[in-house]
Image (spheres, grey):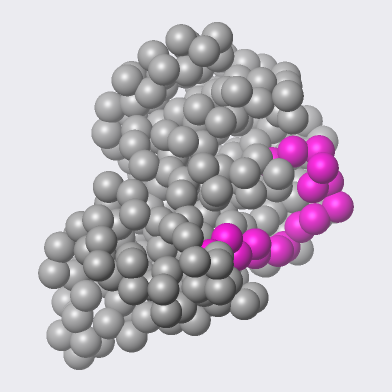
Amino acid sequence: MRLKGKVAIITGSARGMGRVFALRFAQEGAKLTICDVLDCEPVAKEIKTIGGEVLALKTDITSEKDTAEMAKKTAQRFGRIDILVNNAAIIGGENFMKPPEQTMAKDWNRIMEVNVTGTFLCCKAVIPYMKKQGGGKIVNIASTAGLFGIPFFLHYSTSKGGVVTMTRGLARALGDFNINVNAVAPGLVMTEAMQTVFSEEDAKQTVETKQLLKKSTQPEDIAGAVVFLASDEADMITGQTLAVNAGEYLH
């Protein structure tokens, strides 16, 4: 068990990659706070079924109050915060891919509010606890889109590029406190949210024409990278972005 005795917060845990991360962390021995704007209780039940300890919270990561409560309740329940996985994000939904000049300011602002500001607020909430206890691990979920840019998906690409830059800045700011900050940049993973934007045909074309490894990337593939960066094995890694994209983009 690579995370035995560790206390982890995973945002956006109600479905998709967040759910897979939460179950994998529980299998690795972590005590968990799972949180989302959606209902996390079904995932909490799954974790309890496999013997995990879990606290389920309804948390809006764009709310400074909610994120502060998330950190406070985790520390009250488990005594510390060792790991934060910033997974919560939005993609945009159906008909969201548009030329830059047709992108609405309200859509742009909403993406930035959740994906960039929300990630920052979660980090801000846990940093004091990690500093006090002498260390911690923050893993931000970025995206390959934030590395090479998608022209008709500019708001999402820009937001994930912001997560990469934030990761580097936080790593520099927090190194003296033994807090590691890294990011994982998945390629195309057909979660429930991604299916509102990309079709199965899009995914097949990506595998066949863009990836070096000709197989679909699954949430479990991303979970392995996240567990590694959250574990003691990554104690000397900080400020890095690990691309998990089957060679779609060489970072």
Residue at position x 46%, y 10% from top?
Answer: 49
Residue 213 appears anywhere in the view = yes
- The answer to which of 127 and 225 lies nearer the viewer is 225
Image coords of residue 58 (percent x, y):
33, 29
Magenta highlight on residue 103: no
Residue found 34% across the figure and 33% down from its top: 14
| Magenta-drawn segment | 230-245
Looking at the picture, does residue 242 appear above or below residue 46? Answer: below
Which percent across, then down, holds residue 230? 69, 41
Quadrant of the frame with the C terminus: bottom right
Please determine whether, in this image, residue 181 is positioned above or below residue 220: below
Quarter assignment of residue 171? bottom right
Query: Residue 1: x percent and y percent?
Result: 73, 24
Drawn side of residue 208 relative to residue 122, left or right: left
Residue furthest to the bottom in view is: 101
Magenta-colored stretch includes residue 238: yes
Relative to 161, say whether 57 is above or below.
above
Q: Is residue 59 visible?
A: no
In this image, 140 relative to 64: left or right?
A: right
Q: Is residue 70 left or right of residue 212?
A: left
Residue closer to the observer: 135 or 24: 24
Name the residue: 15% across, 63% down. 94
Q: Please tell me whether residue 53 is drawn above or below residue 230 in the rendered image.
A: above
Q: Position of residue 42 (x, y in %)?
A: 32, 20
